[in-house]
Amino acid sequence: GRQMNRLLQGDVGSGKTVVALLTMLMAIDNNFQSCLMAPTEILAQQHYEKLAPLVEPLGLRVELLTGSMKSKKLRRRVSEGLLLGTTHILVGTHALIEDTVQFKDLGLAVIDEQHRFGVEQRARLWQKNTLAPHVLVMTATPIPRTLAMTLYGDLDVSMIDELPPGRKPIKTVHYFESKRLMVNGFLKSEIDKGRQVYIVYPLINESETLSYKNLMEGYEQISRMFPAPQYQIGVVHGQMHTVDKDTEMQRFKAGETHILVATTVIEVGVDVPNASVMVIESAERFGLSQLHQLRGRVGRGAEQSYCILMTGEKVSSEG
């Protein structure tokens, strides 16, 4: 009898998406539609690929809507399905809050990685229906209860405080640049075991004021340390074309590349269970929630995983 406004907090890989799906199914049982909004196209695509095989056997229709979908025919198909009510779940990015997106009867809005969306963006989802839909927002960034009350005072808070069985805690270590050779040796030993590695940089190209290693320089160094054809290296960053980004991600997912060199575009939702090491370069450049999200990209399988924070020899007390 009242609108739900709930924040679901659970560590990366604890199963928030499954909880969201069950909630959506309840809405659909009551003849309402649901939508799931994610902050990036990579993540929206992943949610879509996860949900579709689960709900299609139930005779339900899931559609994907992102900003890069230029095809008018595709967009028309999505719009018609929403207005007729034949589309049950719509997964997408910020594209969902555009005025052109109209639902027949939206009963539940799920927002993933809440900290990426503003209050106004959430509010625009509520206006999609005469009756405000139920709202479930999800985050993997740990928020102390007191902070949750101030930031999300309008929300009830639920916690998933355990991981699926068989997961091991991720070992997190910090090394200075002087330990680089040792770290590279460790990466080689993990790759020899058949595992994969992420290496994340804070910037794409060197800016004049910041002397931090940039992605392209790093890529060249890594290529020297891990020569082809024995090691295959992929690159992903925000200025790449979506198609190229997806191709690189799919190659990494399929195990064709051993090392993925990236910027924080891989921060949320990328799910490769075989990746066991996350190296974060110039780690002092990242915020805590970013580090937490990045670390969550490993440890998604049963193997022991590692997060290695690298910094130069000089680190400020803040850093």
Image (tube, rainbow, N blue to C red):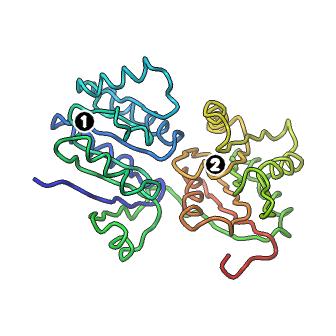
- Outermost residue, left side: 1
Q: Which residue is mark 1?
A: 33
Name the kind of residue labelled 2 in the image: Ala
* Residue 176 image position (x, y, % from top left): 79, 71
Q: Quadrant of residue 64?
A: top left
Q: Is residue 127 left or right of residue 261?
A: left
Quarter of the image with the C terminus is bottom right
Vertical position of residue 55 compared to residue 208: above or below:
above
Q: Is residue 81 left or right of residue 250?
A: left
The residue positioned 69% from the left and 66% from the top of the image is 283
The residue positioned 49% from the left and 38% from the top of the image is 46
Q: Which residue is mark 2?
A: 275
Mark 2 is surrounded, within 10 Å at the Cα level, by few (under 14), some (14 to 19) or many (20 or more) other residues, namely many
Name the kind of residue labelled 1 in the image: Gln
Q: Which mark lies nearer to you, 2 or 1?
A: 1
In depth, the one of 99 and 84 nearer the eye is 99
Find the distance from the CA under tag 2 to the CA under tag 1: 35 Å
SS state under label 2? strand
Mark 1 is surrounded, within 10 Å at the Cα level, by few (under 14), some (14 to 19) or many (20 or more) other residues, namely many
- Which label sits on residue 84? none
* Residue 246 image position (x, y, % from top left): 61, 34
- Outermost residue, top side: 73
Determine contact: label 2, label 1, CB under 8 Å. no
The residue positioned 26% from the left and 45% from the top of the image is 127
SS state under label 1? strand
Of pointers 2 and 1, the one earlier in the residue sequence: 1
